[in-house]
Structures are given as C-alpha cells and as structure tokens.
Amino acid sequence: MYSLLFKSFFRTKIFLVSLVLLMTVGLIGISIGKQYLVKQEKTIIAAQKFQEESIAKNVAYHSDDLGLLLYYLRFTLVKKPENINAISIGQSDVNPLLQAVTIRALEGQKYDTDFENPSLLMSGNLDLGFVIIYLFPLVLIAMTFNLYSEEKELGTWRILAAQTSGKARFLFKKLFVRVLFVFAILILLMFMASAILQIPMDQYFWALFLQSTLYLLFWSALCFWMVSLLKNSSFNALALVSVWVVLTILFPAVVNNYVINKYQVPEALDAMVEQRDGYHEKWDLEKSATMDGFFEAYPQFEQYPVPEDEFSWLWYYGMQHMGDMAAGETSKEMTEKVMLRNTVSEKFALFVPTMHAQLSFNTLAGTDMVGHLGFLKELTKFHENLRLDFYPKIFGKKSADRVDWKNYKAKFYTLEREVDWTYLMLPTLLITLLIGGFGVLNLRKL
C-alpha cells in the first residue's frame, strides 16, 4: 500500500513544486546565515585591528597625559558569535555583537549601534528558522488540505472505500506519506546547515532540531484534524490558511502590542539624557558635590588630592561616574521592564506554537533579548574593571609609557545558556496530542 501511495505522490505536481520550493528557499536561508557569520567575523577582525591601531596612534600623541589619552581610547567587548546563530538570527540584526567604550560615562555609550535600513529590519532575515516557521506549514497545508475532499469530489472515494477495509487508515497513510516527505526535507536542510555553517552537533543543535520536529508535528496534526472534518477542499484550504495567518501573524502582533502598552519601557534616550544632565550640571557646582558621592562609591581613591582652583582628571572622571549614577534608576527600570516583557511573551507562547517555536529558536541560537541583556550586563562589568584599572594610573599622574598596552586587546564574552527541555517540548507536544486526538475521534465517523 505504501509503495503505491509513494508512487502516486511522486507523480503529482505538488511534490515537485514543494521539493523545489523548500530546497531552494532553505538553501537561500542557509546562505543568508553564512553571509551573516562572515559579516560578523569581518566586523570582529576590523574592531580588533582598529583598537590596536587607535591605541598606538593616540599614545604617540598624548603619551605625557594619561587622563587625556584615555578620554579618547576605546576598548572593545565582543559577544563571541556561535555558528548556530545563523539558523535563527533573531534580534542580533538590531542588537550589536560588540561594543567599543571609553572609560567615560557608560550610559551614553551602551546603546550605540550601527545604522541599518529600517525597511530591511522590518522584513527581517530569511534565515532557516524563518523558512521552518513560516514556509514549511504552508507546504504542509498545500499537500494535505484535500486528502479526502479530492477523492470525494473526483468521485473515486466510493471505489477506494470498497477496496479497503479501513478508510480512516487509508487517509492516515496518505497523510503519513506527505508528512514524511516534509520531514525528510527538514532533516536534509538541518544537516546541510550543520555542514555548511559548521555548527557543532551539541545540545543546542539537537534541541533546535527537536523543536523544529515538534513544530511540524503540530501542523501535521492540525492538517489531519481539518481533513477529519470531512469538508470540501475550499473550506479546508480557507480554514487552514486562516489558521496560519492567525498563528503566525495575528496572535504574535496582538501579544506584542499588549506587552508594549502594558509594560511601557523608558527609552534608552532617557537614560542617556539623565546621564549627560547628571554630568554637565556638576560643572556649575562645588567640587565637593561630585567628590563626596564619588569617594562614597570608591573610598580607595580618597588618598588622591583634588585641587579646588584648577582642573583635575580625578574630578572629571568623578563627574562622569556621577552621570552614570544619575541614570542608574532609569537604566535598571528599563532592563526590568524588558525582562518582564520577555517573560510575559513566553507565557503567551505556551499556547501559541508559532510564538513558542520562534522564541525557542532565538533562545537556543543565543540571539534573543535575554542574551543581549546578559551582554549589556557583562559590558557594565567590563567598563567597571577598565575604570578601576586605569583610575590609579591617571590619578597618580603616571605617563602612558608606563602602561603595558599589549594587555589591552579586545575581550570576548561567551553567552551562557541552558536548555530547558520541559519548556522546549511540553507545550507543543501537548497541543499536538490534543489536536491529533480530536482528529482520530472525528475519523471514527468513517
């Protein structure tokens, strides 16, 4: 029976169209991921080279004044890219992979990023994750919506029903052949992505592979349930496409609009303005207004004198730090609200497989917002360590020649994440089993 069903399926136009479409778009998605990795690699190399050249050039001009030299010098922290990022680029196309900062106030530098074409950002990247989430379900719908109705409308169903004892089993076998074809393409594309993008087959790859499998099983169960209603082809096609629009476009848009309005986040510009105001207003105040707060935060620097009648780098960098202190609450509030948005979105996603798959892909690939916030947190530590390293040298009026600049190369940050297998598997699996169960009950009518 299966051999006949496979031969019949391979002779259809939908088989050839689906094969060409999925393979072509899948390879394009892998190619875009490869281009993304190459771009990131070039950016990192350029940033490392720039830092070395910038240090050498500025040391030559300002070797006698370390405070002035460090006003200009930038030091780079890089979120170490992983090749699996290319499967689901996620939010890494808007959030920077690296940050180059001076030892001045951090809040004004934290949210610097490259200029991007907003129309490209709106449409997003056609990576392999996009192909799996949006295109694969459409192909499944196109291949399965008329499994029963086509036979009924062509008048062949009675003949088939007379020749087989299990009509429901026959429909299930027809569905199985088509679903197996889609899964074969998915497996092929995933292993091609692993080979072309040089993705190690670690727990993140297998978790992403498992999530893709469960996601397509959900759509297979949904198509099976729709077929089990024994409606005509027009109804099935319209209903399934409508469900696809609701799950992939409408629900995510509604949830996004809800969390944006429910948990309004202060803009990064607010923190930047507060930081600048907190710094600039200190120029018009007594030096004690700056130094009291600075020495309270860093009592180890009280030993250095602060002249009242002349400029000093101790006072200047103290003002810079107090600017960050002024923006601290707004920055903390913004981070908390963004985390809250992400948490609420994940809770909604438990009941919307498309959202769950997208968020899971980004989390496993390390391209989600939580990963970026982790990078910003590490950037704050990186900036703090730089300041505490250079402050004694600046305040002690050491020359730049006494600093070993070879130790100040670009630093790399590795994102640490864990795979929550229960969260990954359970929601989609339960919904799939529920819908599949309804389909089995409906086919008992046959």
Image: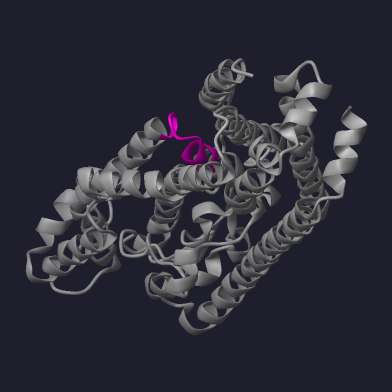
Q: Find out whether residue 252 is within the magenta segment.
A: no
Residue nearest the observer in this picture, 26 or 371:
26
Residue 334 image offset from top left, x and y in percent: 27, 48
How many badges with numbers are in the image? 0
The structure residue drawn at horizontal position 17% and vertical position 50%, both measured from the top left corner, is 293
Q: Which region is colored magenta? A: 349-358
Residue 266 image offset from top left, x and y in percent: 22, 54
Quadrant (top left/top right/bottom left/bottom right) for the N terminus:
top right
Residue nearest the observer in this picture, 323 or 22:
22
Q: On the rendered structure, is 173 left or right of 306?
A: right
- Per the picture, the main secondary structure of the magenta-coloured stretch is helix
Q: Is residue 378 above or below residue 176?
A: below
The structure residue drawn at horizontal position 43% and vertical position 72%, both measured from the top left corner, is 118
The structure residue drawn at horizontal position 49% and vertical position 77%, both measured from the top left corner, is 63
The structure residue drawn at horizontal position 52% and vertical position 56%, both measured from the top left corner, is 92
- For the rendered model, the colour scheme is one colour
Q: Residue furthest left?
A: 285
Residue nearest the observer in this picture, 378 or 209:
209
Quadrant (top left/top right/bottom left/bottom right) for the C terminus:
top right
Q: On the rendered structure, is 170 left or right of 244?
A: right
Residue 166 image offset from top left, x and y in percent: 76, 17
